[in-house]
Image (cartoon, helix red, strand yellow):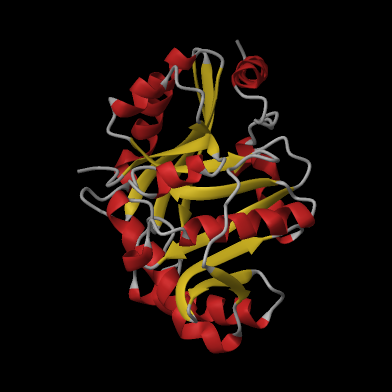
Amino acid sequence: MDVSEIEAAHAARVAALDPLLPVPPPLAPGAGHLLTVDGGAGIAWRQESPLTDPWGPQRKHLLEVRLSEPSSLGGLLDSWFDLIHSSVTPGDLDCAAIVEIPSRDTAGVLALVHRGFVPSSVLAVRPPGRGPAVGPTDVTIRAAEPTDLEAALELAVAVVEYDAPFGKVTPRPEAIAALRLQMAGALAGPPRTWLATRDDEVLGLLQIQLPPESSWCDRYSTAPIAGYLSTLSVRADHRSTGVGSALVAHAHQVFDAAEAPTVLLHHALPNPRSTPFWYRNGYRPLWTTWTRRPLLR
């Protein structure tokens, strides 16, 4: 079976698993190193992120896979490790191997588990119209203004710090400074950032991306237009009081009004609060990121 046949079989297999998954594009050998085994193919490449990026390890070894037979994933991973192990420093906590697969494509995941990967994050999807109706609440949602910079930044940093133990994000001094600049720019632009308040006290933060800014995530689903919910943060002492639900309900109203009713978001899968919260609000897993960090011990 050549690569094109593997790709065709993979596409048919994942289409049967999840109707929201797009047709996988052909592997692009020019983007990295092409690996093949019986029943599987993949492209391996390396990526280095700036220190100002908190959303993962600085040094990433990535593998994009196509599997006509899920059982071939183990051999593909072994070939990948043979390729990259000599370029990796053992014990480097800022270096990881990363594989992203459709969440419902579970037949081969034991190969990842047996090689030290953990499911670190999920790209979740909210299909149109999904999510519970939120009843009356004493939470007020208002657009954030430039004068709200410190309160909004504190809530954004809290997301990074809370998710750090789950391996999804990496707090760094440089990243916090970059978040300040990003937040200042967001508050100076169109209304894409909102605050939840109670008695004028800031309790929560919401940030979204609307089309065309969110067009980068079009490749992840069959939705013709999708929005992206980039940040939701609630102060620790006000969680489970309706603040987060009020913010999400507001986000869904904005997305629906913008004719982008399909919404995507990332969350740390091991997070004991975010996982049940998002699925209670109409989301479900679409893509799962599996991470081995450090890549070598």
Residue farthest top in this picture: 1
Q: Looking at the image, which is closer to me, 273 or 23?
A: 273
Q: Looking at the image, which is closer to me, 151 or 28?
A: 151
Q: Position of residue 156 (x, y in %)?
A: 45, 70
Residue 9 picture quarter: top right
Q: Left or right: where does residue 138 sit relative to residue 170?
A: right
The residue sitting at 26% across, 51% down in the picture is: 89
Q: Where is residue 43 in the image (x, y as percent from the top left)?
A: 54, 34
The residue sitting at 71% across, 59% down in the picture is: 254
Q: Where is residue 36 in the image (x, y as percent from the top left)?
A: 51, 22
Residue 174 picture quarter: bottom left
Residue 212 shows in this picture:
yes
Q: Where is residue 281 in the image (x, y as percent from the top left)?
A: 54, 44
Q: Quadrant of the C terminus?
A: top left
Residue 234 picture quarter: bottom left
Q: In which quarter of the image is the N terminus?
A: top right
Q: In this view, does 290 lie above or below 71?
A: below
Q: Left or right: where does residue 244 sit relative to residue 17?
A: left
Q: In this view, does 157 lie above or below 20?
A: below
The residue sitting at 45% across, 64% down in the picture is: 233
Residue farthest bottom in this picture: 147
Q: Is residue 226 above or below residue 290?
A: below
Q: Left or right: where does residue 75 sit relative to residue 255?
A: left
Q: Looking at the image, which is closer to me, 22 or 239?
A: 239
The residue sitting at 35% across, 47% down in the picture is: 96
